[in-house]
Amino acid sequence: MDIPTKEYLFGSIFLLANKLQTLGDAFLEQMTLKQWLLLIMIFNMENKQPSVTEIAEFIGSTRQNVRKMLGVLSAKGYVTLCVNKQDKRNLSVALTEKTFLFFTQFEAKGAAFLEQLFDGINADLQESARITMETLFNNLERMKMQYEKSDRHI
């Protein structure tokens, strides 16, 4: 079967995400890959105690989905949730020492995982893939804005 390249790439993004999540969930043990990625994204935000809404916007997810994951992470001791000082209707999120300890303990194992995942893909191909992903993200953002202007909701 000869699948056109754009269609192949489109489908592959979803299949790769599913396979990566399944393997990553088994690899991490203490949390899901999505929970780990959420912690990494919070760590990389400028605001070190962002609101749930800020996090949702930053990662491109819904507030409800982020809130659900944060509830689980809070119960496990990886984040603390408290009333936001600027907006009492929202929660602020802070990473805990347990998170930073996990990051430190997982660093070598995570680096080895990435080495295996990208085995056989040289630096030039990795950079090309990075540029492609950034372009796809930019295109999605532009498309989202077009849909919003046309009164269609995403």
Image: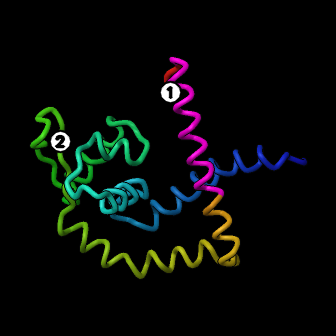
30 shown above or below 144: below
Confirm whether residue 114 shows in the render.
yes
Q: Which mark is residue 57?
A: none
Please state if 118 lies on the left or on the right of 145 as rendered.
right
The count of marks equals 2
Please state if 37 lies on the left or on the right of 81 as rendered.
right
Question: Magenta part of the protein: which range?
Answer: 132-151
Q: Residue at x 53, y 62 (%)?
A: 23
Q: Residues within 10 Å of mark 1 (few under 14, many from 20)?
A: few
104 shown above or below 146: below
Q: Residues within 10 Å of mark 2 (few under 14, many from 20)?
A: many
Name which residue type carries label 1: Ile
The answer to which of marks 2 and 1 sits earlier in the sequence is 2
| Residue 148 forms part of the magenta stretch | yes
Q: Which mark is residue 154?
A: 1
Name which residue type carries label 2: Leu
152 shown above or below 96: above
The one nearer the camera, 9 or 31, is: 9
Please state if 90 lies on the left or on the right of 142 as rendered.
left
Disc 2 target residue: 91
Residue 35 in picture, x, y percent from top left: 36, 55
Q: Residue at x 55, y 59 (%)?
A: 20
Q: Residue at x 41, y 82 (%)?
A: 108
Residue 92 in picture, x, y percent from top left: 18, 47
